[in-house]
């Protein structure tokens, strides 16, 4: 249940209405973000950049995002990004391993395990250790590593936004929660 009322999207005017009109489908996170025109604009610009304009491999990106969501116990985010992960090629075996919190599972490649360890380190400790940083530096370009770090931080913010404002789940999420083990 939302802790802050959703914005009445149909009441938007001008550039705010134009921005909101581009969002399809109109997810609950967008309805909450719409309460702040400038906040929504910046949030969406960065999120779209991380999702669609980066060199970081989309599978690695989605593994990191789902891991952030799980560590943050944010069902909304995990639900959305398990779906997106499947779309970019994350296997069911890897999604199941993330649900079991098994980042060392045989389903993951060595590079994927390094990304998951790095994600854990950044989420839990803010500053990644030299060991986890060096492990991802071994195969990511500096640009991809910056993008991975920004993605982790951005989705930490997303999880805190979702949980603090009480954004409701989307269609299908209630059924999904029965097996999600958050």
Image (spheres, grey):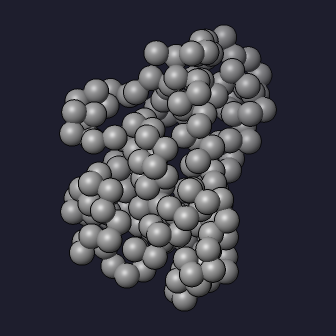
Quarter that holds the C terminus: top left
Of residues 144 and 136, the one drawn nearer to the viewer in this rendering: 136
Residue 4 relative to residue 27: left or right:
right
Tell me how many marks there are: 0
Identify whether 44 is placed above or below 30. below
Of residues 69 and 9, the one drawn nearer to the viewer in this rendering: 69
Of residues 23 and 74, the one drawn nearer to the viewer in this rendering: 74
Write the residue at 42% across / 80% down.
111
Image x and y of residue 91, in percent: 26, 63
Name the quadrant containing residue 113. Answer: bottom left
Write the residue at 52% across / 23% down.
166
Residue 106 relative to residue 125: left or right:
left
Write the residue at 60% across / 33% down.
161
Write the residue at 28% across / 27% down.
174
Asked whether residue 42 appears in the rendered view, the answer is yes
Identify whether 73 is placed above or below 34. below
Residue 50 relative to residue 139: left or right:
right
Of residues 104 and 158, the one drawn nearer to the viewer in this rendering: 104
Image x and y of residue 55, in percent: 58, 72
Name the quadrant containing residue 94. Answer: bottom left
Asked whether residue 10 appears in the rendered view, the answer is no
Image x and y of residue 126, in percent: 65, 59
Image x and y of residue 7, in percent: 62, 16
């Amino acid at each position: 249940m939302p802790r802050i009322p959703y914005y009445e999207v149909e009441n938007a005017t001008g550039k705010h209405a134009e921005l909101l009109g581009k969002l399809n489908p109109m997810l609950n996170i967008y309805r909450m973000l719409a309460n702040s025109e400038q906040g929504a604009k910046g949030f969406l610009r960065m999120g779209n950049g991380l999702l669609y304009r980066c060199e970081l491999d989309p599978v690695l990106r989605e593994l990191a995002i789902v891991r952030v969501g799980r560590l943050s116990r944010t069902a909304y985010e995990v639900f959305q990004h398990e779906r997106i992960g499947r779309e970019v090629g994350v296997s069911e075996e890897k999604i199941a391993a993330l649900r079991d919190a098994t980042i060392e599972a045989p389903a993951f490649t060595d590079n994927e395990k390094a990304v998951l360890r790095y994600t854990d380190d950044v989420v839990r400790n803010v500053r990644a250790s030299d060991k986890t940083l060096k492990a991802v530096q071994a195969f990511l370009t500096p640009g991809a590593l910056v993008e991975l770090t920004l993605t982790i931080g951005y989705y930490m913010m997303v999880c805190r936004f979702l949980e603090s404002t009480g954004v409701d789940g989307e269609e299908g999420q209630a059924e999904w929660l029965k097996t999600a083990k958050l």
